[in-house]
């Protein structure tokens, strides 16, 4: 029993180098997405749907970018970030599910296009990808998400 407690303390003390988030907090964040999001996966992308019509979009763990041994050289955002304001988040750019959100250039010369995956309005593009390109490869379903989209009303 004491060994288990010591292991838990060690895990709590270990921290993620980039954001300094303790591992036990990261586990709780993962539990949050498991609890509050409906997860949909396609061949290479995912869309996590929240009950408030917000969609978290990105690439899944089976995408060639994640599987590749080559590092990411450049991430080129193809959609301009528009100012979104107000309680209802008005002003977002309208996108279709096949709209290319970004292009990823690898060190070996390969280029991949990442699509939105959901119709709606762009609420946020993940600016952390500009600061640390490897998030897309290392943490594709958490810190490496591509964008947040507000779904259209039908």
Image (spheres, rainbow, N blue to C red):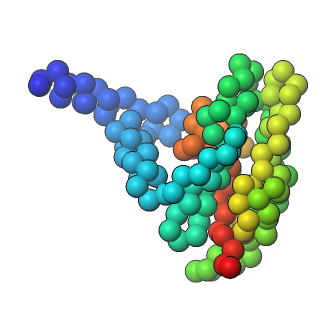
Residue 135's spot in the image, x, y percent? 63, 37
The answer to whether 59 is drawn above or below residue 62 in the figure is below
Where, quadrant-wise, is the N terminus in this rendering?
A: top left
Quarter of image, res 123: bottom right
Where, quadrant-wise, is the C terminus in this rendering?
A: bottom right
Q: Relative to residue 49, is residue 4 drawn left or right?
A: left
The answer to whether 14 is drawn above or below residue 57 in the figure is above
Q: Relative to residue 112, is residue 91 drawn left or right?
A: left
Residue sitting at x 69%, y 34%? 63
Residue sitting at x 38%, y 41%? 27
Residue 72's spot in the image, x, y percent? 75, 29
Residue 47's spot in the image, x, y percent? 62, 53
Residue sitting at x 82%, y 57%? 99
Camera-nearest residue between 134 and 31 = 31
Q: Is residue 126 visible?
A: no
Q: Relative to residue 103, is residue 120 drawn left or right?
A: left
Residue sitting at x 53%, y 35%? 18
Numbered label tally: 0
Quarter of image, res 124: bottom right
Residue 111's spot in the image, x, y percent? 86, 33
Q: Relative to residue 141, is residue 109 drawn left or right?
A: right
Q: Is residue 140 visible?
A: yes
Camera-nearest residue between 72 and 61 = 61
Q: Residue furthest left?
A: 1
């Amino acid at each position: 029993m004491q060994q288990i407690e010591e292991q838990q303390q060690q895990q709590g003390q270990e921290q993620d180098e980039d954001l300094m988030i303790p591992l036990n907090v990261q586990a709780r964040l993962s539990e949050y997405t498991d609890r509050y999001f409906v997860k949909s996966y396609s061949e290479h992308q995912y869309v996590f749907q929240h009950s408030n019509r917000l969609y978290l979009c990105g690439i899944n763990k089976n995408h060639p970018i994640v599987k590749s041994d080559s590092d990411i050289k450049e991430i080129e955002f193809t959609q301009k970030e528009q100012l979104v304001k107000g309680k209802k988040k008005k002003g977002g750019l309208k996108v279709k599910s096949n709209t290319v959100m970004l292009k990823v250039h690898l060190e070996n010369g390969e280029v991949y296009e990442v699509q939105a995956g959901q119709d709606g309005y762009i609420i946020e593009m993940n600016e952390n990808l500009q600061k640390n390109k490897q998030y897309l490869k290392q943490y594709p379903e958490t810190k490496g998400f591509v964008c947040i989209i507000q779904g259209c009303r039908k």
